Amino acid sequence: MTSKTKISDGYSTVLPAEIRKSLNLVPGDILQWDIEDGVITIHPRKKVTLEGICGMISSGGDAVKDKKRVQSGE
């Protein structure tokens, strides 16, 4: 999916509705912006919830992998 937005005078831009809807993004979610070799990538990072944390703990597993997964926003 490709979409265009314009940068306003205040250097703001709008996240297109089709992208918000397809990724189920809501106010308060975080967008992580990265730049490498002149290319910008934007990754959504959902807020960590108590329910999500409890789900991780109750499922057991590798604590280091779980921490990295949470920090990367997966």
Image: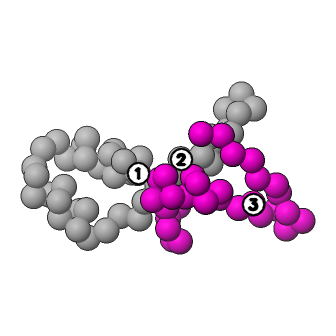
Identify the residue under disc 2.
43
Mark 3 or mark 2, earlier in chain: 3
CA separation in Å, label 1 and label 3? 22 Å
Residue drawn where x is 57% and y is 52% of the image: 19
Callout 2 secondary element: strand
68 sits to left or right of 15 = left
Q: Is residue 4 magenta?
A: yes
* Residue 5 image point, x, y percent: 76, 53
Name the amino acid, label 1.
Answer: Gly
Residue drawn where x is 85% and y is 63% of the image: 8
Residue 13 has which mark?
3
Q: Nearer the viewer, residue 60 or 46?
A: 46
Q: Is residue 9 magenta?
A: yes
Residue 73 has which mark?
1
* Residue 70 image point, x, y percent: 34, 52
Mark whose residue sits in front, 1 or 3: 3
- Near mark 1 (Cα within 10 A), the count class, few <14, some 14-19 or many ≥20, is some
Mark 2 or mark 1, earlier in chain: 2
Which residue occupies the extreme right position in the image? 9
Q: Which residues are magenta?
A: 1-30
CA separation in Å, label 3 and label 2? 15 Å
